[in-house]
């Protein structure tokens, strides 16, 4: 990765995060123009639950990843069977290099629908990026939360433990247990700093002064939107998926335990028969490979279960955030009514 010295200073806005980091990237600095491009990309091509994706360009300065540009993946249909995404990316980066714009690949971005982004597709894509480019990140943009008045843009990386598991491609329960991998140890969130030039900051101050105050009373609206209902509905769907995976794993455990008992009984019968043969002076039975007689049942893959658990946790965090804001408004309204009475 290339690096450069700090350029002109500018005003920054910090998006807070939680959790500890164990990666070469401790902070992400993203240009405000890049954020606008991501938002515009979804507004132009995203419809409802349709996901839009794109490439992030920039460079690394010490432990800070600077994202200075981006471009979207084009939407193509089944008719575009000969479309080569890799070739398209290479041509785009080559064109940007010709006009002296940062062209180094540092990750990708993706929109989400009510926080539904923890999936096997995202895991595989981020592993490919992070395996090829150690500093790469994935930006998750939530247009529904953003439409409610606060920008929802988060950056994630795979943890080193999960990277090792993905390299080995061993997602059995024993391997995940040995690596001590849980849903909370799969992704790490990296803090984001949004950088704007001084001219843009002045423009934002002017636009804020010109904005009408009449729209701000909506922040105190006590009615709940369909956001909570939709989040709970998605949460219940994922809980059903989790229960189905638990049933599969319990079935595997019962079959494995039953086979172990059968194997133990078989060994005991052969030992008893050999004792009787020895007492009669007959030759002992030849030793057999028990593993060929009793093939162990195939364990269900546990990675999908971890991803479901991670998505459930994400839904719970969204519901918690939404309900805490609404409960605060309800308590404030109750206090005002008590004061007026």
Image (spheres, rainbow, N blue to C red):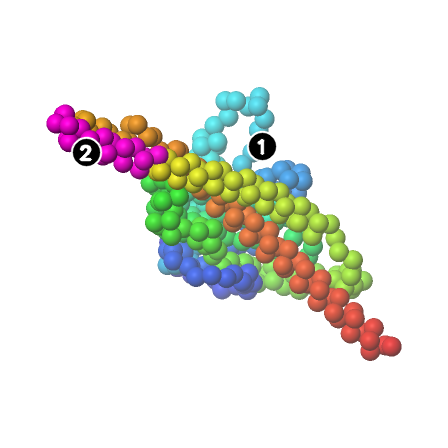
Task: Check residue 275 in the rendering and tell me which mark sits there, or answer none.
Answer: 2
State whether residue 245 is above or below residue 81: below
Say whether residue 230 is left or right of residue 298. Answer: right
Q: Dot 1: within a 10 Å radius of its alpha carbon, few (fewer than 14), some, or many (20 or more) residues?
A: few
Q: Magenta stretch: dominant SS? A: helix
Q: Residue furthest front?
A: 280
Residue 270 shown in magenta: yes
Say which of 305 and 278 sits in front: 278
Label 1, label 2: how far apart the Cα atoms are? 74 Å
Q: Quadrant of residue 317?
A: bottom right
**What residue appears at the point 71 percent right and 49 percent down from the top-left corner?**
229
Q: Secondary structure at mark 2?
A: helix
- Which x, y percent locates residue 44? 65, 39
The answer to whether residue 307 shows anywhere in this view is yes
**What residue appears at the point 42 percent right and 36 percent down from the top-left corner?**
255
The residue at which mark 1 appears reads as 75
Q: Dot 2: within a 10 Å radius of its alpha carbon, few (fewer than 14), some, or many (20 or more) residues?
A: some
């Amino acid at each position: 990765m290339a690096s450069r010295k700090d350029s002109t200073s500018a005003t920054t806005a910090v998006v807070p995060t939680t959790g500890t980091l164990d990666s070469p990237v401790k902070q992400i600095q993203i240009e405000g123009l890049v954020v606008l491009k991501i938002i515009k990309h979804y507004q132009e091509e995203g419809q409802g639950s349709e996901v839009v994706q794109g490439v992030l360009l920039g460079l690394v300065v010490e432990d800070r990843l600077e994202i200075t540009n981006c471009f979207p993946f084009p939407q193509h249909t089944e008719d575009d069977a000969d479309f080569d995404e890799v070739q398209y990316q290479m041509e785009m980066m080559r064109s940007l290099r010709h006009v002296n714009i940062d062209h180094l690949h540092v990750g990708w971005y993706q929109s989400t629908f009510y926080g539904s982004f923890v999936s096997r597709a995202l895991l595989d894509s981020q592993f490919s990026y992070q395996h090829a480019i150690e500093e790469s990140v994935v930006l998750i943009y939530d247009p529904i939360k953003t439409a409610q008045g606060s920008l929802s843009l988060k950056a994630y990386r795979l943890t080193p433990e999960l990277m090792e598991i993905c390299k080995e491609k061993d997602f059995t329960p024993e391997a995940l247990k040995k690596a001590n991998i849980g849903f909370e140890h799969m992704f790490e969130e990296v803090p984001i700093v949004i950088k704007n030039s001084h001219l843009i900051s002045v423009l934002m101050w002017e636009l804020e002064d010109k904005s009408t105050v009449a729209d701000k009373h909506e922040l105190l609206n006590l009615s709940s939107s369909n956001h909570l209902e939709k989040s709970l509905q998605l949460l219940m769907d994922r809980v059903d998926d989790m229960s189905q995976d638990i049933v599969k794993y319990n079935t595997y455990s019962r079959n494995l335990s039953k086979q172990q008992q059968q194997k133990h009984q078989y060994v005991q019968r052969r030992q008893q028969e050999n004792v009787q043969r020895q007492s009669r002076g007959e030759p002992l039975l030849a030793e057999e490979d028990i593993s060929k007689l009793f093939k162990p049942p195939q364990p269900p893959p546990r990675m999908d279960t971890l991803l479901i658990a991670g998505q459930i946790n994400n839904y719970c965090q969204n519901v918690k955030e939404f309900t805490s804001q609404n409960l605060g408004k309800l308590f404030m309204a109750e206090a005002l009514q008590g004061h007026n009475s």
